[in-house]
């Protein structure tokens, strides 16, 4: 007679398909993010990455003393990465890889909290979010921050499941990565304090304290450089109404997933009798989702305005995970429901996916500006914001007007602008036509106080002949001035 144990498949045979599922979800999310490159051109933030990463190490540290000090770990990584090139796809590839890592960890965290199908559905939802395609094809550290945040929750679950020095060390490393990828990613960490137990209090506190050292250092640097974000306006609680759109990257899908996420938290709480830790994890995952926008607004009012939507991309994995848990909790229909949710999500998000893959998908279309500029010999060009030169240097491949104000090829050591002449009238002497390019709408440069450079061109004896705006805000404006 054959025993039941003989008929049971080996544990490794059962675990292998589960592991494959996680790898496939990681590859799927990474590929979806990388496809977000499309034809979207680099915007000002990404060009700032090029400017910082292509400097010498001493130049990068000098820059960090004045601006973007909290991005220094990312700039150091990209300093090594750009040695192989600065093509758009290459610059954005690390972010796509980070999204793939985040999806792998998300799938495994969902398995640990509920089941393999919960993890797979969560990772699939994460992969189809327009916000994932946007930041996964964005040469900044936001995708890194999201991956590091998922890593902390995954590592913390393992450490609480079987406390040992190695697992607590991994958790400490994960916290340090969160603190190093983006300063405001640390706003997810208070939610993890809900999992503190008396038997692990000392080890968890030690791991958190060690991991938060980079946050303390970078936070002090950032506070000293808060003038660099003086452009951020003060916000009120009304910004929370836009939070589902920010996390998902689209309004309709964001609202749907946010409702599902709340249901997922409730269902996870209801399962606390079957899984002892499920109830507390319901609060932890909800905190991961909702605490960052609340705390970021609090910092804005108590310290300095810092509320910017992209700083909250680290909540997108929580949105997907809670929604995936809600679907996985459906009896007998979870697989069909999961497929239906992903299919519906793709349909709802399709217009946004198309938009972010267009040439102007990052809302600063320098190739468009170059096509507008029909340069004639001896034409001049003046930049409303000096740092725009980085983008025009990157994309220009044909005859450009003469950059009459530029006095050096390297950006200024304390920022992203370039050294310029101050005597605009003298620099334009003898030129009949001047192209002026600025970031923003036509009105922002031509009406009211406008831009100093536009005023100086007009005072030098030129009048507006042509002005075109790239369409989406803030966008770029290209204007042609001719001598009166």
Image (tube, helix red, strand yellow):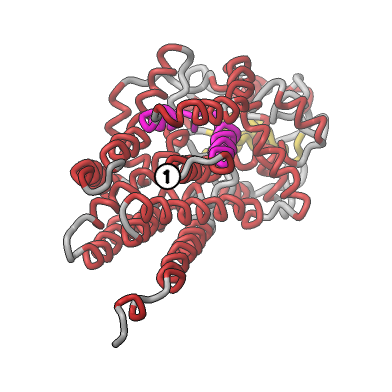
Does 266 sit left or right of 431 as displayed? left
User: For residue 194, what is the image quadrant?
Assistant: top left
Does 141 sit left or right of 90 as displayed? left
Which residue reaches farthest front?
A: 1
Does 80 sit left or right of 11 as displayed? right
- Closest to the observer, 478 or 73: 73
The residue that appears at 76% across and 41% down in the rendered structure is: 54
| Magenta range | 168-195
Where residue 404 appears, as percent x and y from the top left, is 77, 33
- Closest to the observer, 316 or 444: 316
User: For residue 390, what is the image quadrant?
Assistant: top right
The residue that appears at 47% across and 52% down in the rendered structure is: 105
Where residue 368 appears, as percent x and y from the top left, is 56, 50
Q: How many numbered marks have been drawn onto this rendered protein structure?
A: 1
Query: Magenta segment: does it hold 446?
Result: no
Does 347 sit left or right of 83 as displayed? left
The residue that appears at 51% across and 22% down in the rendered structure is: 231
Where residue 195 appears, as percent x and y from the top left, is 38, 33
Task: Provide the residue designation for mark 1.
Answer: 161
The residue that appears at 43% across and 18% down in the rendered structure is: 300
Query: Magenta segment: does it hold 194?
Result: yes
User: For residue 190, what is the image quadrant?
Assistant: top left
Q: Is residue 478 visible?
A: no
- Closest to the observer, 402 or 13: 13
Which residue reaches farthest top?
A: 302
Note whether 111 is above or below 403 in the view shown: below
Note whether 77 is above or below 210 in the view shown: below
The majority secondary structure of the magenta stretch comes to helix
Mark 1 crowd level (few <14, some 14–19, many ≥20, 10 Å Cα) = few
């Amino acid at each position: 007679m054959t025993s039941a144990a003989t008929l049971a498949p080996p544990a490794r045979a059962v675990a292998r398909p589960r592991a494959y599922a996680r790898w496939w979800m990681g590859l799927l999310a990474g590929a979806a993010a990388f496809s977000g490159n499309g034809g979207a051109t680099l915007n000002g933030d990404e060009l700032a990455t090029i400017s910082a990463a292509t400097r010498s190490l001493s130049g990068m540290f000098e820059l960090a003393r004045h601006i973007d000090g909290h991005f220094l770990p990312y700039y150091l990584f990209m300093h090594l990465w750009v040695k192989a090139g600065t093509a758009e796809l290459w610059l954005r590839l690390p972010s796509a890889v980070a999204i793939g890592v985040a999806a792998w960890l998300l799938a495994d965290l969902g398995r640990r909290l509920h089941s393999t199908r919960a993890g797979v559905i969560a990772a699939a939802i994460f992969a189809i979010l327009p916000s994932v395609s946007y930041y996964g094809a964005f040469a900044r550290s936001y995708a890194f921050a999201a991956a590091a945040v998922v890593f902390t929750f995954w590592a913390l679950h393992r450490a609480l499941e079987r406390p040992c020095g190695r697992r607590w060390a991994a958790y400490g490393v994960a916290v340090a990565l969160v603190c190093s990828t983006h300063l405001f990613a640390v706003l997810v960490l208070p939610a993890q304090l809900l999992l503190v137990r008396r038997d692990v209090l000392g080890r968890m506190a030690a791991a958190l304290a060690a991991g938060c050292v980079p946050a303390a250092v970078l936070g002090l640097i950032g506070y000293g450089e808060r003038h660099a974000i003086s452009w951020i306006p003060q916000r009120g609680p009304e910004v929370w109404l836009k939070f589902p759109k920010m996390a998902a990257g689209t309004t309709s899908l964001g609202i749907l997933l946010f409702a599902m996420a709340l249901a997922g938290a409730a269902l996870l709480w209801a399962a606390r009798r079957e899984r002892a830790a499920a109830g507390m994890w319901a609060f932890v995952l909800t905190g991961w989702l909702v605490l960052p926008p609340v705390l970021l607004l609090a910092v804005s009012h108590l310290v300095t305005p810092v509320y910017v939507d992209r700083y909250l991309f680290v909540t997108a994995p929580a949105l997907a995970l809670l929604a995936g848990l809600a679907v996985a909790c459906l009896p007998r229909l979870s697989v069909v429901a999961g497929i239906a949710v992903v299919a519906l999500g793709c349909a709802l998000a399709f217009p946004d996916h198309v938009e972010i893959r267009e040439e102007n998908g990052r809302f600063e279309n320098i190739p468009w500006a170059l096509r507008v500029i029909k340069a004639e010999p001896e034409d001049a060009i003046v930049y409303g914001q000096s740092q725009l030169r980085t983008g025009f240097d990157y994309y220009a491949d044909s005859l450009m007007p003469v950059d009459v104000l530029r006095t050096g090829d390297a950006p200024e050591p304390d920022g992203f602008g370039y050294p310029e002449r101050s005597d605009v009238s003298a620099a334009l002497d003898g030129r009949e036509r001047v192209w002026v390019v600025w970031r923003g709408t036509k009105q922002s440069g031509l009406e009211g106080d406008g831009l100093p450079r536009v005023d100086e061109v007009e005072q030098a004896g030129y009048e507006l002949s042509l002005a075109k705006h790239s369409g989406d805000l803030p966008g770029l404006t290209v204007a042609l001035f001719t001598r009166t």
